[in-house]
Image (cartoon, rainbow, N blue to C red):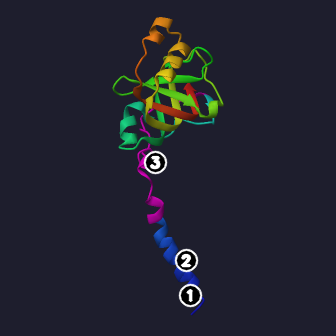
Amino acid sequence: MLSHVPRTLFAAALAVLPFAACQSSPETAAIQEPASSTAPALTGKTYGAPISAEGAQPIARLQQALGSKDSAQVKLVGTADAVCQAKGCWLTMKTKDGQPMRVRFKEYAFFVPKDIVGKTVVVNGWAHRETVPVSDLQHYAQDAGKSKQEVAAITEPEQQYTFEADGVLVAD
């Protein structure tokens, strides 16, 4: 009879395992949706951790991926709207409502080329909703090459989407 106990426990563990594996947090559940089968495969150069476009969601789904959370791990695809002209240490992508989402690079470990505005990019990492302080907004404006007057006109913090990418794919 004791020889059946390990088998019984093993069978019970196997029966419960699929249910336990399905219990994912809301942050990751939204990103497990497969990419459209009609989407073309993107190739290009990666910066930071190697990534592919497989499973990337359009940036238009950012709000859906976040849900009611302040942050979520996600892979997004969109167009680079602006890039830090000082050294390529951030880029922006437009959200569904036309607002810029600033993409910074994990641990400041890599940069992207400064000439990728208008190119399709895939970013992998953590999306966040946050209040960006005036000092950061002014710094980003300087990095983007804004005039002193434009920088000085920034006097209020802003609610923005931000992204910390561990990898970026810039499409050919």
Q: Which residue is mark 1?
A: 4
The tag earlier along the polypeptide, 1 or 2, is 1
Q: Residue drawn 50% across and 33% down?
A: 163
Real-space Cα separation, disc 1 to disc 2, in angstroms: 10 Å
Q: Quick check: is 39 in the magenta stretch?
A: yes
Q: Which residue is mark 3?
A: 28
Dividing the picture into quadrants, the one containing residue 3 is bottom right
Dividing the picture into quadrants, the one containing residue 35 is top left
Q: Quick one: quadrant of the C terminus?
A: top right
Question: Whole-percent x and y of residue 151?
Answer: 48, 12
Q: Residue drawn 55% across and 34% down?
A: 165
Q: Which residue is mark 2?
A: 10
Dividing the picture into quadrants, the one containing residue 157 is top left
Amino acid type indicated by mark 3: Thr
Real-space Cα separation, disc 3 to disc 2, in angstroms: 28 Å
The local crowd at label 1, few if under 14, some if 14 to 19, many if 20 or more residues have their Cα within 10 Å, is few
Real-space Cα separation, disc 1 to disc 3, in angstroms: 38 Å
Disc 1 element: helix
Amino acid type indicated by mark 1: His
The tag earlier along the polypeptide, 3 or 2, is 2
